Image: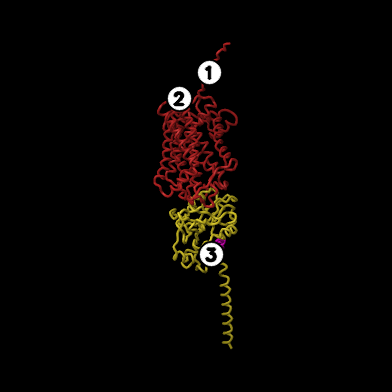
Chain colours: A yellow, B red
């Protein structure tokens, strides 16, 4: 009898313990979304662009503008098109502001490809170095941001960035740039441009995680950095990039 | 060719940023002239010694104005002093500027204390103002005058490296930006220092002639010719450095020359090659060479020096334009150029620039009304009435 009661209690206890564990498992990801996968480590965000996959559809540009309310005539991300003729001459253009559409390809070109550009979120970002009030800063997870409560709108960072990624927003009169959609990535979501890319040409991930997609790509593929001679140590890695691209 | 990054279609640093190094240059140059008198004892510069110091002070007061107009958030300007980021070259501006302003203000105070005392003994608002400036201590005797002179000499000596630091620093702001090959040169701050001295001497000569003309004073020939000789010397160094810098880049034929050569050819041919060098450097050089080497009559020499000073003032303004705007016309894609010309009425346009440049002259006039900036002047002899020959019927 008592054995039966003990068995019943044990079963109830076990059932409650299992239920509690299940609730805990369900609740855990809400507070620490993404952190579980990383084993609680802080991520170190990086960005890779596979130029062999980009088709120049500009979905990323549209998504960025919509997500971040980017000022008209300015860009947090853009796509360049390189067209090379048989004589080696290079023509570069970007999608127009209004409709994000490229014009017809030059029929004389023998090679053409697209190169998406964003802020390189450099490890030694020169914009951070030159900002006189420390409004440009790098977060501990490796994202370069602008503190809009401090920016004085001097434009020194715009001049210092070798990649043309920064601009003075004509509405706020302060510096603006790609944030890697920080409001999204801190919730475990992807940046809007990465989410929107239909071909997977934009890859975002944790460089400190050896199993992440970006780490795997950087281990297995050949890639290039933009303007490495500037000593800024950019964290935007370009796969399949040709020599014409600066 | 002709691709610029999409965010570069808008030039960030406007005409205001051209004006800022131009005005600080006038400060540094004018101060150097006053120090030539106070420290190095160039007695022939006595007629413009006080005026040059006052000019340096007034221009210094106005130097941050174009920056404030340019800032997107000017109400946060003092954050540069309060919460500076010391890794930024720009963060030094507040400290260097303030320290220099204090030195120049102190020197003016000690140089002109006697005049302030004389003015304070009168009546009215001006006397009240002078008494406040003197902290209500009107005592003066031989001992205080001797002490003032010693302090002035010390401050004038201290101000020379500070003037060089201030303007060298402005050059460094541009020269340290590695992203821009038109700016990124170690010679930039040296060029800025020498061109600053050229512009400072030029504005003094120009203003001295202007004031003398308005008041019908006779200009001091020895003073003008001495300024002319200094101007010639400093302009030779400044222009030689500017030329050597670009020639060395061109001669090395590196990758950056491919775009810089095109920048000069396509965007800066008129403002840089024709105006800055061919017209506004070579012509004043020749005119000043004539006055220094061939010793023409004082009347002709004065006119040649005035013409040279006026042209060199324009030359330095052109140099600032070609550096500040020229550098931004070149895309960081190294594949194209953008365009810029300031609007007339816009916030950072030509009218604003003209007003900012005129204000220091107006304030100098007010200063002169309170404390005379020139020693007692000899008036020009009235022109002889034209001879009238009786008409013969």
Q: Which residue is mark 2?
A: B298
The disc label shown at residue B384, or none: 1
Q: Is residue B178 above or below residue B377?
A: below
Q: CA distance from mark 2 to mark 3?
A: 80 Å
The percent position of residue B116, horizontal first and vertical second, equals 53, 31
| Residue A185 showing in the rendered view | no
Q: Which residue is mark 3?
A: A199
Residue at (55%, 27%) from the top-left corner? B214
Neighbour tally class for label 3: few under 14, some 14-19, many 20 plus, Cα within 10 Å: few
Residue at (50%, 23%) from the top-left corner? B378
Quadrant in the rendering for residue B124: top right
The percent position of residue B98, horizontal first and vertical second, equals 50, 42
The percent position of residue B103, horizontal first and vertical second, equals 48, 38
**Chain letter for the residue marked with disc 1 in the picture:** B
Are callouts 2 and 3 both on one chain? Answer: no
- Looking at the rendering, in which quadrant would you find the C terminus of chain B? top right
The percent position of residue B145, horizontal first and vertical second, equals 47, 30
Of B34 and A54, the residue lying toward us = A54
| Residue B66 showing in the rendered view | yes
Task: Tell me which label, 1 or 2, sits earlier in the chain.
Answer: 2
Neighbour tally class for label 1: few under 14, some 14-19, many 20 plus, Cα within 10 Å: few
Are callouts 1 and 3 both on one chain? Answer: no
Range drawn in magenta:
A182-202
Q: Is residue B242 above or below residue B306?
A: below
Is B230 in the magenta?
no
């Amino acid at each position: 009898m008592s054995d039966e009661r003990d068995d019943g209690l044990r079963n109830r206890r076990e059932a409650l313990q299992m239920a509690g564990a299940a609730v805990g498992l369900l609740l855990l990801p809400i507070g620490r979304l993404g952190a579980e996968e990383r084993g609680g480590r802080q991520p170190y965000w990086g960005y890779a662009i596979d130029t062999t996959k980009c088709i120049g559809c500009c979905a990323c540009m549209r998504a960025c503008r919509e997500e971040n309310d980017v000022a008209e005539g300015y860009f947090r991300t853009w796509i360049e098109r390189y067209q090379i003729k048989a004589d080696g001459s290079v023509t570069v253009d970007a999608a127009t502001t209004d409709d994000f559409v490229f014009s017809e390809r030059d029929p004389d070109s023998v090679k053409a490809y697209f190169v998406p550009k964003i802020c390189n979120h450099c490890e030694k970002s020169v914009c951070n170095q030159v900002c006189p009030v420390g409004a440009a800063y790098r977060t501990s997870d490796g994202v370069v941001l602008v503190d809009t409560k401090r920016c004085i709108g001097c434009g020194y960072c715009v001049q210092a960035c070798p990649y043309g990624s920064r601009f003075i927003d004509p509405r706020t009169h302060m510096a603006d740039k790609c944030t890697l959609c920080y409001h999204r990535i801190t919730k475990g979501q992807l940046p809007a441009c990465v989410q929107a890319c239909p071909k997977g040409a934009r890859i975002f991930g944790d460089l400190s995680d050896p199993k992440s997609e970006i780490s795997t790509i950087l281990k297995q593929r050949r890639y290039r950095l933009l303007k490495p001679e500037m000593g800024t140590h950019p964290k935007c890695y370009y796969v399949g990039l040709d020599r014409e691209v600066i | 060719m002709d691709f610029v990054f999409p965010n570069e279609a808008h030039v960030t640093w406007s005409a205001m940023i051209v004006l800022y190094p131009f005005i600080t240059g006038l400060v540094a140059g004018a101060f150097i002239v006053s120090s030539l008198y106070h420290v190095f004892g160039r007695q022939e510069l006595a007629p413009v010694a006080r005026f040059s110091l006052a000019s340096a002070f007034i221009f210094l007061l106005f130097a941050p104005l174009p920056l404030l107009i340019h800032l997107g958030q000017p109400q946060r300007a003092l954050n540069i002093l309060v919460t500076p980021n010391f890794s930024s070259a720009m963060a030094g501006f507040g400290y260097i500027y303030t320290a220099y302003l204090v030195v120049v203000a102190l020197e003016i105070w000690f140089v002109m204390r006697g005049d302030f005392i004389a003015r304070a003994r009168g009546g009215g608002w001006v006397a009240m103002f002078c008494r406040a400036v003197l902290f209500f201590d009107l005592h003066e005797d031989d001992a205080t005058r001797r002490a003032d002179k010693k302090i002035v000499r010390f401050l004038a000596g201290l101000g020379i490296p500070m003037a060089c630091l201030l303007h060298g620093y402005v050059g460094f702001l541009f020269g340290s930006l590695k992203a821009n090959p038109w700016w990124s040169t170690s010679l930039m701050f040296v060029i800025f220092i020498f061109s600053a001295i050229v512009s400072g001497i030029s504005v003094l000569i120009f203003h001295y002639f202007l004031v003398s003309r308005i008041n019908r004073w006779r200009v001091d020939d020895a003073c003008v010719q001495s300024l002319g000789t200094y101007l010639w010397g400093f302009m030779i160094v400044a222009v030689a450095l500017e030329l050597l810098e670009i020639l060395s880049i061109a001669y090395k034929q590196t990758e950056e020359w491919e775009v810089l050569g095109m920048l000069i050819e396509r965007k800066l041919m008129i403002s840089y090659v024709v105006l800055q060098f061919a017209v506004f450097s070579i012509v004043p050089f020749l005119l000043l060479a004539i006055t220094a080497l061939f010793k023409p009559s004082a009347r002709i020499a004065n006119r040649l020096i005035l013409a040279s000073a006026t042209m060199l003032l324009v030359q330095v303004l052109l140099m600032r334009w070609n550096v500040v705007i020229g550098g931004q016309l070149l895309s960081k894609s190294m594949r194209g150029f953008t365009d810029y010309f300031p609007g007339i009425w816009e916030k950072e346009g030509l009218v604003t620039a003209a007003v900012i440049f005129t204000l220091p002259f107006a304030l100098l006039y007010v200063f002169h009304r309170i404390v005379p900036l020139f020693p007692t002047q000899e008036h020009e002899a009235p022109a002889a009435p034209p001879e009238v020959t009786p008409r013969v019927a």
